[in-house]
Amino acid sequence: MRGGRATALPAGAGVSGLLYPPALRKARRDQQLVSKRLLRADPPKEAGKVVSILGEAEIQQFLRLAQRGTEEKEREKALASLRQGLQHSETQQAFIRLETSMRTLVGLLTSNQALLQLEAARCLHELSHSDQPVVAEACLPATSYLLTYLSSHSSDFTELCLYTLGNLIVASEGVRRQLLPQGIVPALAACIQSPHVAVQEALGYALSQLLQAKEAPEKIIPAILASTLPQHLLQLLQPGPKLNPGVAVEFAWCLHYIICSQVNNALLITLGALSTLGPLLLDLAGAVERTEDAGLELLACPVLRCLSNLLTEAAVEAVGGQIQLGDERVVAALFILLKFFLQKQPSLLPEGLWLLNNLTANSPSFCTSLLSLDLIEPLLQLLAVSNVVSVLVLTVLCNVAEKGPAYCQQLWPGPLLPSVLAMLAASDTEVVGQSLELLQLLFLYQPEAAQAFLQQSGLEVLDRHKEEAQLQDRVFALRETALHG
Amino acid sequence: MQLPPAIRARLAEGPGAAEPLPVERDPAAGKAPFRFAARRVRFPREHEFFEDGDVQRHLYLQDVLTQVAEAPERPRVSEFPCQVAGCQQVFHVLEAYEHHYHTQHANVCSVCKRAFPSSHLLDSHLLEWHDTLFLTLAERQDMYQCLVGGCKEKFRTSRDRKDHMVACHLYPVDFRFDKPKKSKGPSTPEVLAPMSAEALGEHSQQLEGDAMEVCSTGHVTPPPAPEEESCTPPGLPGRRAYSHRVPATICFGQGASRGFRSIKKRGKHH
């Protein structure tokens, strides 16, 4: 399997053929996918009300009232009104046009009146949700305070500050350039020890945004790896009754962004990443079995990615990682997940098969498990889901077959040959090419299979591709092998 | 996709690996024109392979919006007062009370009654303002620790520390993290205020103190109108010398109680 381009798929289709809106795909390719979280905590009675856009004069009025009103309730109401108005981008623009508005808001953020402080924080949160980097940058004067308040014992407030920071982080590189020297990494490392689940999830979100920054591999991830964050991160991913799914999703994605940036994965392995992720995968499969599948694919995806990428590290061998992971329950778990993906989220099949490739490529033990657990036939059932999936399935089968006669004897006779023949009849070059590779191995180690091939009109199917430039040589060679051994 | 029934059982059993079948490769395998070689594959950050999963993740984050937009249960109860003796704040909503407690009563200096956003900052304050040993040592060595987590720098004066935080950590020049309590006392109310500091005033008054003192005082907002106090009251440098003549053991006003336990339920999206 090459880590290269997916072969011909309908326009707009993803790697697996699933159709997502073209704009989203393009944004992903252009690296502009910006995800923001918004906490809106309006009391129910406000939900139905239409919120109007505020102009500069009204904003000033509300701010003045919030700052200097005589009645506490009056001040809170003024700030709440401002907050609602800030749901509109026009209000946000008007707000940032006013020279002292942010200073005033930051002053209210540091108020010793609890409700004012909370409302001011909510106003900032609304601003952080803006699409415009210029609005995010207008919030720069507030960041040192947001960071200070991360160590607050008020979990609601900390949660709000974290989501606000997460939004600001993603909106502008200028914000990130300030947050790093201001100490965001130590602040997060301290805050991650909070026992509050909502705070943990919010922190995971903010951290995941920080890790996706384009400058992250050079400027951010090294600092994170040098802190205590990785240990805490892994701790929060420990499977068991205390694992919170919402929290785990965020931190699994964080781990994925760190790992795929390939800054220092050896460190993560020494910190025990494999011995966390392996059992977590088993746990996930168990949850699927118990049909507790609400949103499990959201956690499965990053876990699969982390495991697959980590397995390519040389450090894995050093800590006997293959042995740790050599537990064949991992294979059983993976197939339970593959079946789940087929039913619920076929676009994740390639990711699952990627892990299967990385498990089986250099491991006689895992290849043997595939055979002894009778998983070849289920694997064959995935053929023809899509071209990418087919290529991956064929690659895994090649991983098994290339280990020699003892393995090929288990592959034929059986359903494998007819399935591969069907793939040979496909039009996709890569699918056909990988089928040819598999057949070569099969004929080499199990010559009787070649006979069966001929009897099943294999040559005719083969000959369909003899004009194809990328396939010709292999077609001819295979033909020779089949006919003359 | 049909899985063999033994799979479920296998998952439930203990760890174990299959005794691998013997590996025996023929050199002709994967030889030209064939090219197969079993190998692990890694995908870097921006690889196209991740496109689908990334889009799903993005949609999930956007979706959370609709979940959390449902108003969380914030039961409004009839007005109740703050439990801390002397505090006259009242609340309708438990979350606001919790926030109030944690920010106004949880990390309070028992000497000068100031509240701090975190126990770390309270500890720094106690050291720098109410510890005579610290002040003695500070005369001879660098004792003022940078307030940014992880920074090990220490400075001779709080002014130097502030300059460092502004220059190296990009902190705002007027960084302050709490508002002072309203005080009816004389111009140095911080050490002499006999009244309970738990009574929160409507207008925060200016009290002396430098920015980034771990006893922050003063407004962040510039005084827009004459009724506000000015930002830099006189006698500024002298204050510190004055304050530490008061022995740390003398405690004015009541101590903050720390026994609060949260009873609220969280009605968020899980």
Image (cartoon, rainbow, N blue to C red):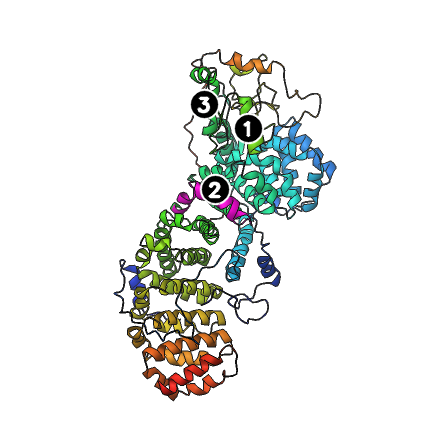
The amino acid sitting under disc 1 is: His
Q: Which residue is mark 3?
A: B256
Asked whether, in this view, residue A143 is left or right of residue A313, the answer is right
How far separated are the C-alphas under marks 2 and 1? Answer: 20 Å
The amino acid sitting under disc 2 is: Ala
Q: Are marks 2 and 3 in contact (CB under 8 Å)?
A: no
The answer to whether any part of residue B118 appears in the image is yes
Q: Which mark is residue A223?
A: 2
Q: Does the magenta run of residues contain A219?
A: yes
Q: Which stretch did the figure color magenta?
A: A211-234
Q: Chain of mark 1?
A: B
Q: Nearer the viewer, residue A30 or B219?
A: A30
In this view, A406 is above or below A176:
below
Q: From the viewer's perspective, is the residue at label 2 or at label 3 nearer?
A: 2
Q: Does the magenta run of residues contain A148?
A: no
The quadrant of the picture occupied by the N terminus of chain A is: bottom left
Task: Give how far across and how far down residue A348 sits, in percent.
Answer: 47, 63
Residues at marks 2 and 3 on the same chain: no
The answer to whether any part of residue B267 appears in the image is no
Q: Which residue is mark 1?
A: B164
Task: Give how far across and how far down residue A6 sits, in percent.
Answer: 52, 68
The amino acid sitting under disc 3 is: Ala
What SS does tag 2 mark? Answer: helix
How far separated are the C-alphas under marks 2 and 3? Answer: 38 Å
Q: Quadrant of residue A341?
A: bottom left
In this view, B80 is above or below A377:
above
Residues at marks 1 and 3 on the same chain: yes
Task: Give how far across and how far down residue B24 sits, in percent.
Answer: 29, 71
Q: Chain of mark 2?
A: A
